[in-house]
Amino acid sequence: MIAMASITLQSGFTFDAGTLYGPDGVTEEELSAFEECCGKAHTALMDMRRKGTIDGHLSKDGEPEAVLFTRLPYIAEENINTPERIMALETLGRTTRNRVDAVVFFGIGGSYLGGKVLFDVHCGAFWNYQSTAERNGYPKIFFSGNNVDSRSLGEIIRFLQGERNAKPAYTVVAVLLSKSGSTIEPMSNYMIFRQAMMDASVALETVAVTDPHVGEKETLLHHLAEKSDWPIFFVPDGVGGRFSVFSEVGLIVAALIGFDIRAYLDGARAMDQVCRNGDWHENPALFNSALKYLAGKLHGRCLEVLMPYGDCLKSLSEWYVQLLAESLGKRLDKRQRVVNYGRTPIVAVGTTDMHAQTQEHQEGPQDKVVQFISVTDWENDLVVPHLYDEYAQLEAFSGLPLSRILESARSANAEALAGDGRPSANYILPQLNAYHLGELMYMLCLSVAYEGEFAAVDAFNQPGVEIYKKFLGSRLKALKEG
């Protein structure tokens, strides 16, 4: 299953370790010496799958807390994604289609980033410019709540008000994603938006995605949703926001754009099955995480560039920034020793950033791992026409599909980096579809979970995020009082 430092699954998905594994990266001897640690980390994740907890992970209150993201790919009655919950999502998609004009998602962090990936991959940049028929009856889609930016929100409001003025009736669905209902960014945006839609006589429906508990544990948003008779979908217990794309948090976006939820979870489940193998020769998440951990520990590779080749995959890199930074950027290890562990993630896109960041990747400090994402078979590939063959510089790429030019640029980038002893690796998707996207995103989630065990840090908490919130609360109070 492994050859030339690559692992290829039956689906065709490939993790090519490239020069990240070898003389200029992590050597065979270094990886072999690390096998015992790999085995312990794998055992810890297998136990986590079975028990739903992992040693060293505690809630904000200091109590053991569940870690359940590995259960999300499995649709079963006893799991988080039950057949009934998946059917509820699919029903929402059907009842919205050909009835609702626009949907606005209000979320931040994991409530925004994962769903945005699904949208960008499935819909592309010009979805809202297409006719209803071209969108197969699905509504226009907007994302808000991921900042407190008056201009951004105001532009959405003015656009929808203009659409309403051009039609006798106009229906908008607001999807409000917040586990607590007190998250400042989505809630402030939603309240402004709701008032603006009421003022413009827009028919506004709201769907809440929040904590499932009722009674004493009921959150503000859950209470508000019940009081207002809004449909409620769930932010599951035991699943941090950065892992939640496989739950209703991300899948609600999929439902409202016609993205294949079941194929996406099938891909994640297939990756999970492969990664139950404790041999790094056959487990791409274990292999990937071990290489990057050792590249940092032994070779000073403290930055990680994720560089997909394709514009629609930029948001995937942005999602990964949160996944890596929040999971592994930790001051303390599980024994409460100061370690200041982490690797700084960097968003890049090929070929765009070959004309920008690559200069620094190629000649800057030797402190980076560059990971590419490439797609073998692009749908609706375009070919450069023979318009100016009298010019040798243009004739050189006339007649070539853009996909082949794109891949040639990526491989040239990898070769140039290798020529200066700079390691890179590549995730290869046979096609850009829901199944292979599920494989890749789930593999990346497992990779950070493995690395948390290698570094003995809690990959499932985010104490650094909580610190600024305390300061922000006092500042907002002062603003109100002033």
Image: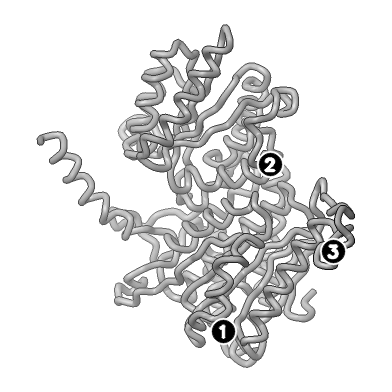
Q: What's the distance in space between the residues labelled 1 and 2, CA to CA?
A: 41 Å
* Residue at (68% x, 52% y) in the render: 437
Q: Earlier in the sequence, mark 1 or mark 2?
A: 1
- Report the residue marked by disc 2: 122
Is residue 160 visible in this depiction of the protein? yes
Identify which residue, 281 or 367, lies in the foreground: 367
448 shown above or below 22: above
Q: How many marks?
A: 3
Q: Residues within 10 Å of mark 1 (few under 14, many from 20)?
A: few
Q: Secondary structure at mark 1?
A: helix
Residue 22 x/y as whole percent: 67, 87
Q: What's the distance in space between the residues labelled 3 and 1, CA to CA?
A: 59 Å
Residue 421 x/y as whole percent: 62, 87
72 shown above or below 49: above
Q: Earlier in the sequence, mark 3 or mark 1?
A: 1
Residue 332 x/y as whole percent: 32, 71
Residue 39 x/y as whole percent: 58, 78
Identify which residue, 84 or 92, lies in the foreground: 92
Q: Earlier in the sequence, mark 3 or mark 2?
A: 2
351 shown above or below 142: below
From the image, state whether disc 3 or disc 1 is nearer to you.
3
Colour mapping: one colour
Circle 2: residue type = His
- Report the residue marked by disc 3: 391
Circle 1: residue type = Glu
- Report the residue marked by disc 1: 36
Residue at the far front: name it: 390
